[in-house]
Image: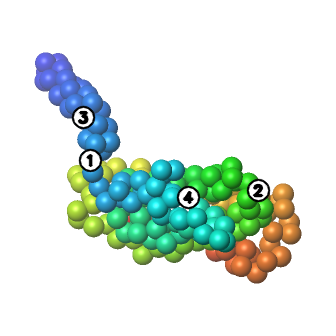
Amino acid sequence: MSNTFKKIFLFIFYFSLFLLVTLPPYYFFKDTEFKKLSNSFSVEQVRTTCPISPEKESYLDCFRPSIIKLIEAASPMEVLKIPSLIKDLRDRDIYQGVFPSQTLQSQYLGSIVVMIRNLSLYEIKRKNIDFFQILILPFIRTYFQRTLAQIKEETNQYVKDNPDFLSIEMNKMNFNLINSTRIEIF
């Protein structure tokens, strides 16, 4: 009897070890449409995606149309990267220091709203998902809900620190939409 448990335990152990060793390189080296689109967000590609124009444009404004394309091409695991890409764009704009922080926060909220509206229409395409992702969908959903809660918390903190931010109607509308939305994806 104990020999049977030992065989079962060893099978589970070796199977788990196999998955832990092979899955990360697989997802790292797997070439997807999402990776190609998200590479356009890199610093090297900014010059071709956002050409220098007479009017200075922030990265958030320049890449906002690309967010929709990213969501359409994303697998469930890749959807988790979209909020961090948007945050990286905001951080790049803050680092440049060309725009006031209130303008950047307004553009950030606008990008988050675009993400939320398009994720509510998100459908998993068969070519974008594999068996492992099907197994971990509940964990992906939980992680994404935590990420969205963190975005809401950061936004609420910004509004507490800058109460005049909501005096602009668009900011107030975006703020209310972000705080009232609960995305049920997957």
Q: Nearer the viewer, mark 3 or mark 4?
A: 4
Q: Which residue is mark 2?
A: 157
- Quarter of the image where one finds residue 55: bottom right
Three-letter code for the amino acid on which mark 3 is drawn: Thr
Q: Which mark is residue 128?
A: none
> Along the polypeptide, which appears first: circle 3 or circle 4?
3
Distance (Cα) linking label 3 and label 4 = 29 Å
Q: Residues within 10 Å of mark 4 (few under 14, many from 20)?
A: many
Three-letter code for the amino acid on which mark 1 is drawn: Lys
Label 4 sits on a secondary structure element that is helix
The quarter in which the N terminus is drawn is top left
Residue 12 in view here: no
Q: Position of residue 40 (x, y in %)?
A: 43, 57
Q: Nearer the viewer, mark 2 or mark 4?
A: 4
Distance (Cα) linking label 1 and label 4 = 23 Å
> Along the polypeptide, which appears first: circle 1 or circle 4?
1
Q: Which residue is mark 1?
A: 30
Distance (Cα) linking label 2 and label 4 = 18 Å
Task: Report the residue at 73% width, 54% height from top.
Answer: 97
Q: Is residue 151 toward the left or the right of residue 145 in the image?
A: right
Q: Which residue is mark 3?
A: 22
